[in-house]
Image (tube, grey):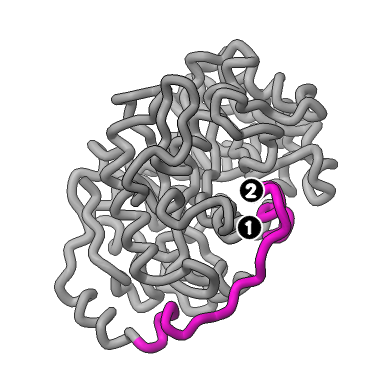
Amino acid sequence: MSASGESSTTMHRLLHASGSHPIPPPNDPNQTMANSHTWIILIGLSVILCSRVADAKIGVCYGILGSNLPSPREVVSLCRRYGIGSVRVYNPNPGVLKALNGSKISVMVGVPNEDIPTIGQNPAAAQAWVKNNIRGFQDVKFKYIVVGNEINPLDPATASIAPFVVPAMQNIYAAVSGSSIKVSTAISTGILGKSYPPSAGAFWADISGYIGPVIHFLKRHNSPLLANIYTFLPYIGDPHHISLEYALFTSPSAFVVDGPYKYQNLFDATLDAIHVALEKFGAHYVDIVVSETGWPSAGGLGASVQNAKIFNTNLVKHVSAGTPRRPGKHIETYIFDLIDENQKSPEYERHWGLFLPNKYPKYPLTFS
């Protein structure tokens, strides 16, 4: 669910996320924003969308593929107004970084996929990238540099970039030496060959030559793996086997029983499958940061304001509880997306925002 157009195509992500062909859903007017505009405005005038962001370890993804988005300065003011303390940006946009300067908002910034081959082959290019985009913004609170989004050696769209990811991570790490910034990369669940049950979690055998060195780098430098985890995509890809309740954190009982571990939601099951996959590479103690997750408010099967509210509300409540395999361990998580982006496709890709472009929140959401 790349906000910058640098990841795999939507169709490719659906196929990998669901394990089956995606189902093109109808655009149900009862699930769109069109007939609830007045309600949204009333909510926007009164809701408080904030509190204890740092404690809950919840951030937001800030994408800029929209023709009607507020300015970066307005967006930063919006974040500060509502207590949003962490953001993920997908490329080092100078206007965005300038607006974040001095804001005290923690920033996860991406190295765009197309820049990775050059940076991976040329340490001087990494030094220049860091000089221009990190050191040039001394008052931005950088937390992570994400070298690539959803690179997959099995995906024709990113296969040619994959050999350069670890060299680029190494060169960027050397360029930020002495800082507290962590260097990592963001994966999609498409690189999991097995995810059910979670105890069988494993990366595709064909990508071991790629993911192995990535994991080695993370272990060596005590960096987390970043993972984009969507329960919406598997749900629309296979709604006959994945219930809406399991995807929304509303299942009344265990949907999957995996030995001693009971799973009432797909988010935990997916996250634990990645934990198990990491363990098979000896990475028991590599943390996972959920670098994208969320639910759209319109444009597809199960996409509605109500379901988006349910998912994100339950997500915020849940992240402090951990997963069945990591109980009590806070899950640092970034909600996709901050504001709707109208230049994306298909239709549901345009409706992930917590806010409308006019800066009104779509529904009440308390980060606590």
Q: Earlier in the sequence, mark 2 or mark 1?
A: 2
Residue 368 among those drawn in magenta = no
- In the picture, the disc for residue 17 is 2
Residue 182 seen in the current view: no
Left or right: residue 365 versus residue 171 is left
Residue at image coords 28%, 79% = 40
Left or right: residue 249 versus residue 365 is right
Number of other residues with Cα within 10 Å of mark 1, as a class: few under 14, some 14 to 19, many 20 or more: many
Highlighted magenta segment, given as a residue range: 9-35
Alpha-carbon span between mark 2 and mark 1:
8 Å
Residue at image coords 29%, 74% = 360
The residue furthest left is 46
Residue 306 lies, with reference to residue 185, above or below; the image says below
Residue 26 seen in the current view: yes
In-front residue for pair 26/133: 26
Q: Which residue is mark 1?
A: 237
Q: Position of residue 219 (x, y in %)?
A: 56, 15
At label 1, the amino acid type is: Gly
Q: Are marks 2 and 1 in contact (CB under 8 Å)?
A: yes
Number of other residues with Cα within 10 Å of mark 2, as a class: few under 14, some 14 to 19, many 20 or more: many
